[in-house]
Image: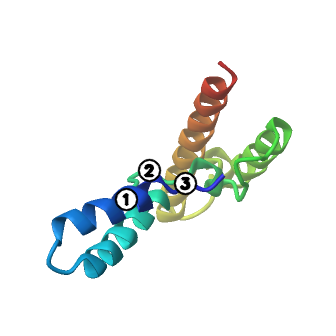
Amino acid sequence: MKRVYGKVLGVIAGVLLLRGNPLLGALIGLLLGHAFDADWFRSRENPYRVFGLDEEASDAEIDLAYRRLMNQYHPDKLSGVAPELRHQAEAKARELNGAYDRIQKLRKRKDS
């Protein structure tokens, strides 16, 4: 379901704040409300995107994607490569582990 409460509140606030030109206020409020509804201002990245999945993915799909990418980027598998490539692989592995942990927490919250 798409969120619309940001747009509605934005239009109301825009009209009230710009009483001299309510149409302009409504337009600005609508744009800002859309930005909030679309999560443009979220600081965290969607953990599902790290694995190339969407939020409707099953637990088996998430585990498979995690294992596949960890197998590809695990630092121990890249022992003979240049140090800068190894550091990039370590950073990617940390990102994968963090995204997997966030997904597990989100799934646990959703089940509760």
**Nearer to me, 75 or 34:** 34
Q: Which residue is mark 1?
A: 41
Q: Please identify the residue farthest to the left as the structure is shown.
A: 20
Q: Which residue is mark 2?
A: 44
Mark 2 vs 3, N-terminal side:
3
Rendered-image quadrant of the C terminus: top right
Classify 87 as above or below 82: above
The percent coordinates of residue 79 (x first, y second) are 62, 52
* Left or right: where 69 falls relative to 45: right
> Which mark is drawn over residue 107?
none
Confirm or deny contact between disc 1 and disc 3 (CB under 8 A): no
**Nearer to me, 63 or 14:** 14
The percent coordinates of residue 42 (x first, y second) are 40, 54
Q: Residue at x 51, y 59 (%)?
A: 88
Location of residue 14 by image quarter: bottom left
Tell me the colour scheme of the image. Answer: rainbow
Q: Nearer the viewer, mark 2 or mark 1?
A: 1
Spatial distance from mark 2 to mark 3, Cα to Cα?
19 Å
Answer few, some or many: residues within 10 Å of disc 1's Cα (few below 14, many 20 plus, some between 14 and 19): few
**Nearer to me, 68 or 55:** 55
Location of residue 59 by image quarter: top right
Confirm or deny contact between disc 2 and disc 1 (CB under 8 A): no
- Which residue type carries mark 1? Phe
Mark 1 vs 3, N-terminal side:
3
Spatial distance from mark 1 to mark 3, Cα to Cα?
15 Å
- Which residue type carries mark 3? Arg
Spatial distance from mark 2 to mark 1, Cα to Cα?
9 Å
Location of residue 51 by image quarter: bottom right
Q: Which residue is mark 3?
A: 3
